[in-house]
Image: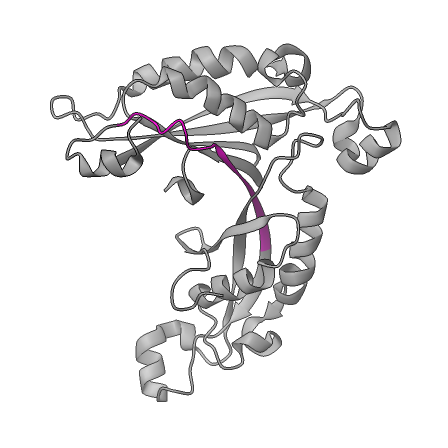
Amino acid sequence: MVLITRKIEFAASHLYHNPELSPEENRRVFGKCNNPHGHGHNYALEVTVAGEPDPVTGMVLDLKELKEILEREVMQRMDHRFLNYEVVELKGKIPTCENIARVIWELLEPKIKKGRLHRVRLYESADLFADCYRNGAGGV
Amino acid sequence: MQSREDYRSSGSFAYAQDKAAPLRIELGRRYRFAASHRLHTEALSEEENARVFGKCANPYGHGHNYMLEISVSGEVDPATGMIANLGDLDSFVEREVIEAFDHHSLNEDVAAFRNVVPTTENLCIEIFKRLKSFPKAKLERVRVQETTNNSFEYSGEGSNAV
């Protein structure tokens, strides 16, 4: 089995706010991420697909195809968007790295027809990221 | 639906995802610290130390900018969208690791390395020991990058299991 990874970057804004908590609790739990008009990040997304290279093409899947899936499912939905208000899949969820990574997994998994989705890693900054796997720890 | 064991034993590769398996989310966080160390052991002669550790055995030690990456897992709290509050995680790591190691000599200032060579392998194990009691999430893995060209990982398994 071979793992192949494609990386894309998108810029988006968000804020953390739970309407079921009081303003003071929101402030305490989310800190400056609760600022009412939001803030933004350059997100980096690494998508890893596992599979066997096709004996004819030598490819697990055509990276061009993966690029198109990422463009359609992620870039068009999230790039230069306000995640809380413009991404329906995140409605009612706090748009943390954890939740965005899961949404991206759920968008991508049914679209990948060759190989299988192994890992979605979403960086919110160089020092903070979330990994999503289908299987056990570390995707194994 | 076939089990994953069936896929493995079927002889042909089947990529259908086991949809019954739940999605797992891990939170990854990176920290940095600068520390000095010397690779040297009393168990070997000076010549053997020099042969095994090379310039890392130079008597006064040397330093690195270490990058520590930790991964934790757990349920994502629907109220916060988080596995663990970052402030809680950061203050725990700061207290247990960064304060003890940053701008220190690993050999001289960290009791665990009095009789253990502070290689980055052993550093990973020591950091795992210090962080595994984080109360808000499960520590999955520790990865330490000693330089941009080498990194080491430990997930609490093997004969050194902690």
- Against B35, residue B23 (above or below) is above
Judge by depth and name the residue closer to the eye, B91 or A125: B91
Residue B155 picture quarter: bottom left
Residue lying furthest left: A56
Q: Quadrant of residue B100?
A: bottom right
Residue B122 among magenta residues: no
Residue sitting at the far front:
B1
Classify the position of the C terminus of chain A by image quarter. top left
Residue B21 painted magenta: yes
- The image quarter containing residue A54 is top left
Q: How many numbered dots are placed on residues in this image? A: 0
- On the question of residue B69 being in view, the answer is no
Left or right placement of residue B41 versus residue B64 in this view: left
B162 or B69, nearer to the observer: B162
> Is residue B22 in view from this perspective?
yes
Residue depicted at x 15% and y 21%:
A57
Start-end of magenta stretch: B15-32
Residue B113 location, x and y as percent?
53, 76
Looking at the image, which residue is at 41% across and 29% down? B20
Where does the N terminus of chain A fall, quadrant-wise?
Answer: top left
Q: Residue A131 location, x and y as percent?
A: 49, 36
Name the residue located 55 percent from the left edge and 75 percent from the top edge: B112
Give the x, y percent position of residue B145.
47, 54
* Residue A48 higher or lower than A61, as above or below: below
